[in-house]
Amino acid sequence: MRKLLLSLFLFTALANAQTKEKTAINALLDNWHKAAAEAKFDVYFGYLSEESIFIGTDATENWNKKQFMDFAKPYFDKGRAWNFTAIERNIYFDKSGKIAWFDELLNTQMKICRGSGVIVKEGKEWKIKHYVLSMTVPNDNINEVIKAKSALEDPLIEKLKANYKPN
């Protein structure tokens, strides 16, 4: 009976801790997106880990934090960057509770996009370590999208294939 009560207590404590951390991560991501909508450059980039990676919707957008800051600065300087609002989000944790990953659907100026990423606990704060933004494409429209992308991406595919060297 004692083991059962102890197990129940530990399970409840773990569930409560994860609920607290999910609340913190949801707030972080919502505030991160809000900082972009309000063009708050320092706030926005403060949510990213120093070693973070941001992968955008264009095949050439694979940036470390500094590269992403350089790309984004002109948008923020104009007083409006981008406006993403979560409409669905799932958050998961590793066993240590110090690494989380998530996926989200976003309402954006590009219609529905998908964001996914990895968040790490740095000290007492969660920081975005890796983020991938993707546009969603309805399955019924795949051929139209492929046709629209082909002229730009076929040469890029050849260039990337020629330069590809696995790590």
Image (cartoon, rainbow, N blue to C red):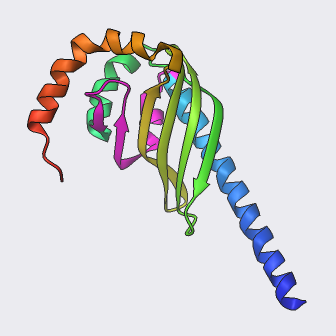
Relative to residue 90, is residue 121 drawn left or right? left
Residue 138 shows in the view: no
Q: Quadrant of the N terminus?
A: bottom right
In the image as oriented, which residue stretches furthest toward the left? 162
Q: Quadrant of residue 56?
A: top left
- Residue 18: x %, y % from top left: 68, 59
- Residue 144: x %, y % from top left: 41, 9
151 and 13: which one is in front? 151
Q: Is residue 35 above or below residue 144?
A: below
Residue under the image location 29 percent in, 25 percent down: 71
Q: Is residue 60 above or below residue 23?
A: above
Residue under the image location 74 percent in, 63 percent down: 15
Residue under the image location 47 percent in, 49 percent down: 118
In magenta stretch: residue 6: no
Q: Quadrant of residue 57?
A: top left
- Residue 52: x %, y % from top left: 36, 46
Residue under the image location 34 percent in, 42 percent down: 53
Q: Quadrant of residue 142?
A: top left
156 and 115: which one is in front? 156
Q: Which residues are magenta?
A: 37-63
Q: Is residue 104 above or below residue 90?
A: above
In magenta stretch: residue 53: yes
- Callout count: 0
Relative to residue 55, is residue 43 drawn left or right? right
